[in-house]
Amino acid sequence: MMFLVIYACKKDPVEKGFISDEIRLKGADTIDVPIGIRTNTDVAWLDGSSQPVEFYIENIRDANGNRSEQFFEELPYRSWLQPYNYLTDTTLEQVLAKISEQKAPPIIINKTNGSLYFLETTSTLQNPGDVFHIDVRVKNSKGERIIKDYAKIRLTQSGRDFDINMATTAILLVNTNGETTFTLYDDIQAATAPERIQNIYDNNGKELFQLTRVADTPYVGVRLILQFKDAEGRIFDPRDYDIYSTTTDSYFRLGLNRVNTEEGAMVEFPMTPWPVSSGFMTTFEKSGTYDYSILDTATLRREVYEEMKYASLNPWPEPEWGAIRWYARLRSQVKFLRSGTYKISVTFPCTYLDGTFN
């Protein structure tokens, strides 16, 4: 009888934790990965697995099931150690002091939520267009499990090198009192003129503002060449390019190591995306201030105010206003996503550096 009582009180041990074999990465069945751009995916779907769950990349296989070693080569990349402030971090030494350079594979996984991070060093990966299968090892209180096909990725050479939200090309007149007024004001906004923004992405030459990625180097960071051109393609002296005002942002403030070259004014920055901000930053640059010997004011006035070939912001000033000089201005919102060298080239119509319009 004693034996029966003891047996009746005995309990089976409670199973500790649960780990599903259906853990997957949230999102599309196959994720397109634009090579050379820093980006990341959604997090893991845990299918009721006990938390916390840890994630580790176990293998990345090609279409034939073979391990693709290119994904496991550790390459140098950069990350921020401290918040960057362009108003105070104005030298390369100050910026680099806030950056950590370390080595890692081009694809890494967030240990705590399973998100995949793709670094700029994906630019070294071969066979774009191929699909690769990512297997991960997951671990929790239940133990460990290998999840085959946690995610499938396709390497692509698509994906934009940059995002652009605005480009405004303008010519301003200056009078004897130093006052200014806008004449030509070619304003391209993504919200109101998406087809014109697409012209810039397509680099089809239809807009006064053009932006192109012209070289793969530097492999980490951005080099930007800014050039203002007259109606016939001659480049204004880059030594005259400047910030628009003391209260506006500019590539000349956001960039480092300015050098004036025959191609234009060049600045650099050691990280992408750039400019460093949560969204777009509005930047302003202007040319030097010139007399009317290189501005065809008669054609400018006719094409802007009579033919309406270009938009305007203000009326053409009356003679008594006293306009005697002018300058060109650029306002833009661009974020550079992929490392390399870029060129912003802006044409200002009715300007002739050799003065031959007469």
Image (spheres, helix red, strand yellow):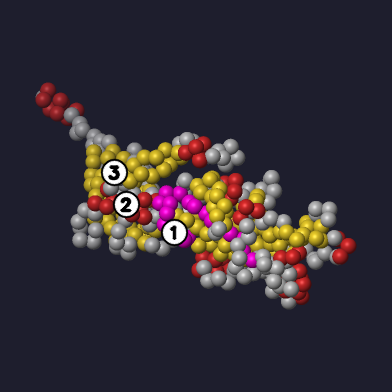
Of the numbered discs 2 and 1, the one sitting upstream in the chain is: 2
Query: Which residue shows up at 88% across the image and 62% down it?
Result: 320
Q: Which residue is mark 1?
A: 215
Q: Which residue is mark 2?
A: 24
Q: Nearer the viewer, mark 3 or mark 2?
A: 3
Mark 3 to mark 2: distance in Å? 13 Å
Mark 3 to mark 1: distance in Å? 35 Å
Q: Which residue is mark 3?
A: 56
Residue type, numbered disc 1: Ala
* Looking at the image, residue 63 lies above or below residue 141: below
Of the numbered discs 3 and 2, the one sitting upstream in the chain is: 2
Residue 145 seen from this side: yes
Q: Measuring from the top left, give residue 279's x and y in whole percent.
A: 55, 50
Mark 2 to mark 1: distance in Å? 38 Å
Q: Which residues lie in the magenta part? A: 213-230
Left/right of residue 179 with respect to residue 289 in the rendered view: right
